[in-house]
Image (cartoon, helix red, strand yellow):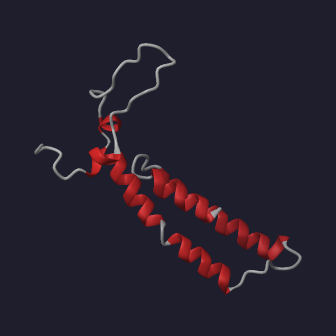
Amino acid sequence: MILNTVFITMMFGTGLPILFPIAMISLFVIYVVEKGMLYYGYREPPHYDKSLNAAVLNILLFAPLFLLAFGYWMLSNKQLISNDFLEPKDRKMVPYNSLHTMWSSLNPWKGIF
């Protein structure tokens, strides 16, 4: 649950900043529930060892990369910022063309050529 909460918050936090306090509250609730279950609920403590802790910390190293990548995409996508770039569809069956590609975001000569 911790990994799920952190990664979802990092992926969509730039577009929905309310996710950061929600994630903080969620992580606090997870901590309190696990601590309570450890003391009062489990007959025998779960078998957590150093390898599980190291694996989770290694996976969490990628969370800031998700924040940077998805944040850059959200802040550079003109369709998320304004409605000027939307085009009407003729029929429902016609697929939507977003006119937003990876190359248009990463092109350093965007305004030159």
Where residue 82 sits, quadrant-wise, is top left
Looking at the image, residue 58 sits to the left or right of residue 31; the answer is left
Q: Is residue 91 left or right of residue 54?
A: left
> In the rendering, at what x and y percent does residue 24 appear?
53, 61
Q: Quadrant of the C terminus?
A: top left
**Quarter-of-image position of residue 80:** top left
Picture coordinates of residue 17 (x, y %)?
Answer: 42, 50
- The residue at the far top in this view is 90
Q: Is residue 36 left or right of residue 57?
A: right
**Residue in the image at 41% along x and 53% along y:** 70
| Relative to 9, 36 lies left or right | right
Answer whether residue 20 is visible to the viewer in this image: no
Residue in the foreground of this view, choosing between 91 and 50 = 91
Outermost residue, bottom direction? 50
Q: Depth check: 60 or 17 in front?
A: 60
Towards the viewer: 83 or 26: 83
Instruction: Tally the marks.
Output: 0
Q: Residue at x 61, y 77 (%)?
A: 55
Q: Nearer the viewer, residue 36 or 60?
A: 60
Q: Quadrant of residue 87?
A: top left
Camera sees residue 60: yes
Determine the residue positioned at 35% across, 49% down.
Answer: 73
**Above or below for 55 versus 74:** below
> Given the current orientation, which residue lies at the most extreme right position?
43
Report the quarter where the N terminus lies.
bottom right
Q: Residue at left 33%, top 38%? A: 100
Q: Note whether 62 is above or below 14 in the view shown.
A: below
Residue 42 location (% of width, % of height): 85, 73
**Relative to 10, residue 81 above or below:** above
Location of residue 23 in the rendering, given as x and y in whole percent from the top left corner: 54, 58
